[in-house]
Amino acid sequence: MNETTPPDVGEDRSVLIVDDDRSFLQRLARAMEARGFEVATAETVADGLARVEASAPAYAVVDMRLGDGTGLDVISALKRHRPGARAIVLTGYGNIATAVTAVKMGAVDYLAKPADADDVVAALLASADHKPIPPENPMSADRVRWEHIQRVYELCGRNVSETARRLSMHRRTLQRILAKRAPR
């Protein structure tokens, strides 16, 4: 089995779900168990790293922003311990820059929260040569604007003043935009 081919359904179906939203974590864990996965959960980066160290799963679903760091650390550790593992990133604060970083670190997909369990399973089990169908509801103009602002913010090293200057925007306006969740 190589990195681009998911394990067969009959093979290892272990999945680690790392998310600091306890109710979402529990709902997704139950949904994944109902779909035949052997689920382990973690609410922090530290707990996720410990679970990977103890027994690296075949799959991982990791929240981007956690209370004690970034979920990308868990994906990086998973790829070191089990290179063929397939991981996806979930986040309510998604942007193109972090999606690119997640994929470079080994994630196979990047989904916006709240993600449906069927979408999570489809992303985990998709083969590398499978092209996803175009979205029924593409990004809105507000979302495209938000993505652009997030990209410039990341490129400016997360410096609000420099980002505001480059976007010809008042710093306080930018801070309000950055504090909000992504528009649909």
Image (spheres, rainbow, N blue to C red):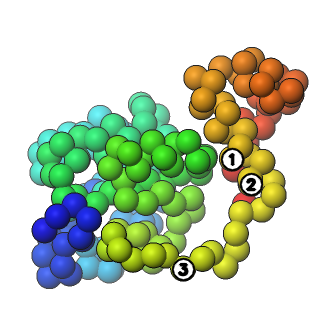
Q: Report if residue 82 is visible in the image.
A: yes
Residue 132: image location, x then y, percent: 49, 76
Residue 97: image location, x then y, percent: 56, 42
Badge 2 amino acid:
Arg
Position of the C terminus by quadrant: bottom right
Instruction: Say which residue label 2 marks.
Output: 143
Badge 1 amino acid:
Glu
Instruction: Say which residue label 1 marks.
Output: 147
Foreground of the two, 132 or 79: 132
Position of the N terminus by quadrant: bottom left
Instruction: Say which residue label 3 marks.
Output: 133
Badge 3 amino acid:
Ile
In the displayed structure, 150 sits above or below 4; it is above
Inter-mark Cα distance, 3 to 2: 20 Å
Q: Residues within 10 Å of mark 3 (few under 14, many from 20)?
A: few
Q: Earlier in the sequence, mark 1 or mark 3?
A: 3
